[in-house]
Image (cartoon, rainbow, N blue to C red):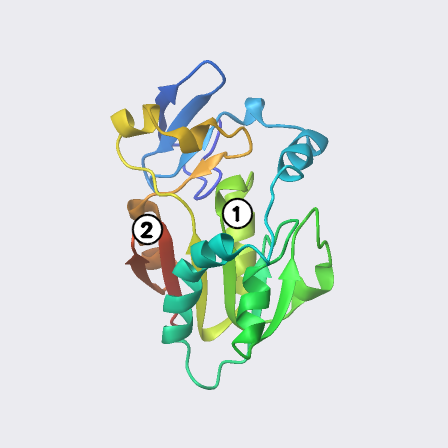
Amino acid sequence: MQLCPLCHSEQHVLFAEDKNRSYFRCQQCALIFADPNAQLAPEQEKAVYDQHQNNPEDMGYRQFLSRVATPLVERLPASASEGLDFGSGPGPTLSIMLEEMGYNMAIYDPYFAPDPSVLTRQYDFVTCTEAIEHFYQPAKEWGLLLSMIKPGGWLGLMTKLATDADGFKRWHYKNDPTHVSFFSRDTFRFLAKRDDLEVEFVGNDVILLRKTQ
């Protein structure tokens, strides 16, 4: 029996299909996940990421990332000093922006900054922008993210949120073959309740969670 890759429930249904993949929706946590049999091999996945033109000199990209950076920093206590950008990609930019604001930043990316030592520490906050939708094993990676946040610390996420089935069928976001896990507000509410987190949605694609204990 195939299990939900996030909450490990057996209860999921076929949600949508296109010419490339089938998509299933978990009836417990509401995660929508692509058929694991359609996942890319690591070298194919990296080839897609290598095409990304992320650059810290790009003011448009900085403006895009400020949608998570600004509300996150507004909520951080004055004592917060250390953060980690998880899934920093080929052109780390958010970490530079936060360093410019006075925070000490570490970065991690499985392809472009694969330093496992940064994953063994705890931080005042962790950011993960446009990366969570790439998680093949979201239960494992979600647990890792939470383990790196100090009690009272924050997780700042950026990902497009799934809505209903009709919208999903027309959604360009699902057409990227490296996008395999699609979260919704219901998914984050489930995780917040299960994992003792406070959750706040900022706009259409920013999710802020505070670890309460």
Image position, residue 165 (x, y; %): 28, 27
Residue 183: x %, y % from top left: 38, 42
Q: Is residue 98 above or below residue 94?
A: below
Amino acid type, label 2: Phe
| Residue at 38% from the left image edge and 63% from the top image edge | 209
Query: Which residue carries the number 1 mark?
Result: 131
Labels in figure, total? 2
Q: Is residue 194 left or right of residue 93?
A: left
Q: Nearer the viewer, residue 18 or 67?
A: 67
Q: Earlier in the sequence, mark 2 or mark 1?
A: 1
Q: Is residue 164 visible?
A: yes
- Please report the residue visible at 66 percent of the width from the left and 49 percent of the height from the top: 90
Give the spatial CA distance, label 2 vs label 1. Answer: 20 Å
Horizontal side of 101 relative to 70 (left or right) equals: right
Locate the C terminus by quadrant: bottom left
**x, y percent for residue 212:** 38, 72
